């Protein structure tokens, strides 16, 4: 029985003609299709397509009239591909991928027009939309920033609540952009993570953090505070990540237990890799914190098998401490952390009330503007 999403064409039958408005594309299931265009009144064959090939997808992508004619060479069966199947995926794609595709398409159309002696079409929106343009530019600028020393690492203090002392710091990257001013890591870290650019960025932060630890030791800070380093998915994929950390520490004769690793909760779903990383860190004497707890998938499964030393409670929970439900939730998370043998760091502590409530509940550490903003190293050593 003929199904509506499949169409049969007899040998020689027209599938679509040059100039038609595009409604669908086709996937060749069986048989052969010939694609041709008219040149000086004669048909010029552009290609012959067999099973597995797409036909007529170009016009569907950029919504332009068909630039070629397709005809069945032999009896064939084609699967009808609705334009929305492409349009929705294209809209959801990375804007850079979309720009590359549409850019190539428009160039192909111009070349085709030249070949057939038609008026070459305007080159069209060569680099796609503004989002793609911004993204490509920002990424190139980030590469330069790395080379030009525009990236800077700040330290935000973490207080041990019971003893009222600064136990360590979290390293947070900053980009001082010559025109845009300070660009938030929320904006550029994600961008760097989409490509392998996060690897040299992470390497840079690691180097700076080790320099800072060495400087704190030189200044006689005792006990030497720890510095926590944020690591991204791509860095975790690198089997040499822990070796690199140990090399950088060893080059400055620093004890590995002063470097702590923070892994954001949303990455923890991929637990075999994380388990291996935690094991390697522990073998080297480094501790590992689960970052942004409560914001990811709230999947507690990974906690069963992953041996985190600390849990960092996301700031949204700290903000909720002014409500009974928030208090109840934080208490429950603290009880869970204790049962797992993990220490807890509350993030985003901005008020004395929050700090007091957390201390009362038995939370070990606090980080946030009340304790201190992220500052350059010289403010840590001189302050
Ligand atoms: P995060 O790891 O959750 O870092 C904590 C964020 O909360 C920081 O934002 C910090 O400045 C901010 N914060 C600290 N205390 C308070 C407070 O009391 N109130 C409020 N409202 N915010 C507070 P920041 O520095 O903008 O960093 C954003 C994110 O970028 C970080 O979130 C982290 O995921 C990522 N990031 C920063 N540096 C690095 C890095 O070197 N490597 C990687 N992979 N990611 C980084
Ligand atoms: Ca963090
Ligand atoms: Ca966090």
Image: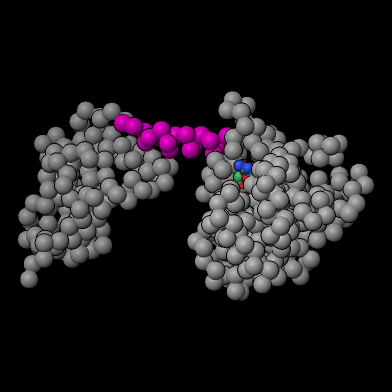
Q: For this rendering, which residue is in front, 39 or 283?
A: 283
Q: Is residue 314 left or right of residue 345?
A: left
Q: Residue at x 20, y 31 (%)?
A: 117
Q: Residue 259's x, y, as percent?
A: 77, 56
Secondary structure, magenta segment, majority class: helix
Q: Residue 60's x, y, as percent?
A: 23, 45
Quadrant placement of the C terminus:
top right
In the displayed orientation, state which residue is furthest to the front: 324
Q: How many marks?
A: 0
Q: Quadrant of residue 307?
A: bottom right
Q: For this rendering, which residue is in front, 317 or 340?
A: 317
Q: Residue at x 7, y 56 (%)?
A: 12
Can residue 251 be seen here? Answer: no
Q: Residue at x 54, y 40 (%)?
A: 187
Quadrant placement of the N terminus:
bottom left
Q: Relative to 347, does residue 4 appear above or below in the rendering? A: below
Q: Relative to 169, does residue 30 appear above or below in the rendering? A: below
Q: Residue 120's x, y, as percent?
A: 25, 29
> From which residue to which does the magenta span run?
124-141
Q: For this rendering, which residue is in front, 310 or 229?
A: 310
Does 127 lie within the magenta span? Answer: yes
Q: For this rendering, which residue is in front, 6 or 71?
A: 6
Q: Is residue 132 left or right of residue 28?
A: right
Can residue 328 be seen here? Answer: yes
Q: Residue 300's x, y, as percent?
A: 55, 68
Q: Quadrant of residue 365?
A: bottom right
């Amino acid at each position: 029985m003929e199904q509506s999403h499949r169409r049969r064409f007899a040998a020689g039958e027209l599938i679509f003609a040059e100039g038609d408005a595009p409604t669908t594309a086709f996937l060749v299931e069986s048989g052969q299709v010939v694609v041709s265009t008219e040149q000086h009144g004669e048909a010029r064959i552009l290609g012959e397509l067999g099973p597995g090939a797409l036909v007529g997808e170009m016009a569907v992508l950029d919504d332009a009239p068909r630039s070629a004619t397709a005809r069945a060479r032999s009896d064939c069966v084609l699967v009808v591909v609705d334009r929305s199947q492409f349009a929705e995926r294209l809209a959801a794609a990375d804007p850079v991928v979309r720009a590359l595709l549409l850019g190539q398409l428009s160039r192909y159309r111009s070349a085709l027009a030249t070949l057939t002696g038609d008026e070459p079409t305007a080159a069209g929106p060569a680099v796609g939309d503004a989002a793609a343009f911004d993204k490509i530019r920002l990424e190139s600028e980030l590469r330069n920033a790395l080379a030009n020393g525009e990236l800077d690492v700040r330290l935000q203090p973490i207080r041990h609540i019971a003893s009222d002392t600064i136990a360590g710091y979290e390293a947070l990257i900053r980009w001082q952009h010559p025109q845009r001013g300070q660009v938030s890591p929320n904006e550029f870290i994600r961008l760097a993570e989409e490509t392998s650019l996060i690897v040299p960025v992470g390497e840079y932060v690691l180097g700076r953090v080790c320099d800072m630890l060495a400087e704190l030791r030189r200044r006689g800070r005792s006990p030497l505070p720890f510095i926590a380093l944020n690591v991204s998915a791509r860095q975790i994929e690198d089997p040499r990540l822990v070796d690199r950390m140990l090399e950088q520490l060893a080059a400055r004769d620093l004890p590995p237990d002063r470097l702590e690793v923070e892994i954001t909760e949303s990455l923890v779903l991929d637990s075999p890799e994380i388990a291996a990383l935690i094991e390697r860190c522990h073998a080297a004497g480094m501790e590992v914190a689960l970052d942004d707890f409560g914001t990811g998938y709230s999947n507690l499964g990974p906690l069963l098998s992953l041996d985190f030393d600390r849990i960092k409670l996301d700031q949204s929970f700290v903000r909720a401490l002014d409500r009974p439900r928030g208090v109840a939730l934080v208490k429950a998370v603290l009880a869970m952390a204790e049962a797992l043998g993990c220490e807890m760091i509350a993030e985003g502590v901005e008020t004395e009330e929050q700090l007091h409530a957390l201390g009362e509940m038995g939370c070990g550490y606090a980080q946030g503007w009340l304790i201190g903003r992220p500052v350059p190293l010289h403010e840590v050593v001189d302050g």
